[in-house]
Image (cartoon, rainbow, N blue to C red):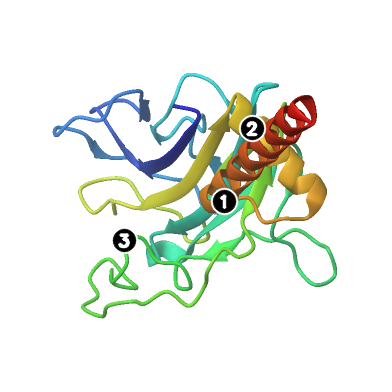
């Protein structure tokens, strides 16, 4: 498949005695997290990680469509493309990103570990964030309060949803970007149909000219 919807969920869970893992199990335990440190969900060394940084090849195009994180412990989530943070303060200084209070994960979760309230999101990632071919991208989680160690360690999580366009669909995504058209599955399919219609019209015109 050349166009795939993907999700990635991270949590500060790992086997006993470890801070990170490549495969989550039911026996994993919460891991303490330092305060005010940006943690890469993919290779940050805490919780469930993958084997290498998230990046696009020369024939891939990624569209990040949603991000969210636990609201407790003053959590926030940020997008970084290469070395540039997507969310910044109005004076173009660094910020930790979108707070979990604005984009909670999971939806309807409480604002604190012991809370009974149900948070609704007040933030939508619009427009979507584009990761061009050959770029590295990160989803960064920060807790301002830190997550302590011991039996009272909180479980926090973060989430991102994205669409991966590969091969010919990545070429179409780049073309739509040049045209200033929003990149989504519907518009990619529309562009494919347009190409087919143009080819059919050209073939019909050539056949008519030969028959004249």
The quarter in which the C terminus is drawn is top right
Residue lying furthest left:
26
Question: Which residue is labeled 3 in the image?
Answer: 106
Residue 201 falls in which quadrant of the image? top right
Residue at coordinates 48% horizontally, 73% vertically from top-left? 102
Dot 2 surroundings within 10 Å: few (below 14), some, or many (20 or more)?
A: many
Residue lying furthest right:
91
Element class at badge 2: helix
Q: Is residue 38 visible?
A: no
Q: CA distance from mark 3 to mark 1?
A: 24 Å
Residue lying furthest front:
212
Closer to the camera: disc 3 or disc 1? 1
Question: Which residue is labeled 2 in the image?
Answer: 170
Q: Are marks 2 and 1 in contact (CB under 8 Å)?
A: no
The quarter in which the N terminus is drawn is top left
Question: Which residue is labeled 1 in the image?
Answer: 184
Residue 180 vs 48, above or below: the answer is below
- Percent position of residue 166, x then y: 57, 28
Q: Nearer the viewer, residue 90 or 31?
A: 90
Dot 1 surroundings within 10 Å: few (below 14), some, or many (20 or more)?
A: some
Q: Are marks 3 and 2 in contact (CB under 8 Å)?
A: no
Left or right placement of residue 166 versus residue 9 in this view:
right
Residue lying furthest bottom:
117
Residue at coordinates 39% horizontally, 66% vertically from top-left? 104
Residue at coordinates 48% horizontally, 78% vertically from top-left? 122
Q: CA distance from mark 2 to mark 1?
A: 11 Å
């Amino acid at each position: 498949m050349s166009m795939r919807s993907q999700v990635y969920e991270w949590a500060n869970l790992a086997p006993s005695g470890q801070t990170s893992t490549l495969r989550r199990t039911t026996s994993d335990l919460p891991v303490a997290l330092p305060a005010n440190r940006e943690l890469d969900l993919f290779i940050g060394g805490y919780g469930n990680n993958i084997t290498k940084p998230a990046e696009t090849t020369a024939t891939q195009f990624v569209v990040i469509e949603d991000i969210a994180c636990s609201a407790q412990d003053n959590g926030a989530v940020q997008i970084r493309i290469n070395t540039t943070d997507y969310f910044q303060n109005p004076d173009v200084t660094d910020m930790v990103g979108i707070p979990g209070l604005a984009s909670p994960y999971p939806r309807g979760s409480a604002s604190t570990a012991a809370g009974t309230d149900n948070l609704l999101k007040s933030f939508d990632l619009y427009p979507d964030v584009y990761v061009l071919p050959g770029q590295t991208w990160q989803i960064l989680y920060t807790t301002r309060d830190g997550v302590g160690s011991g039996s009272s360690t909180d479980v926090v999580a973060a989430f991102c949803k994205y669409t991966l366009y590969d091969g010919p669909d990545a070429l179409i995504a780049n073309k739509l970007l040049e045209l200033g058209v929003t990149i989504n599955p519907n518009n990619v399919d529309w562009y494919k149909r347009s190409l087919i219609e143009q080819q059919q019209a050209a073939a019909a015109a050539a056949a008519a000219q030969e028959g004249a």
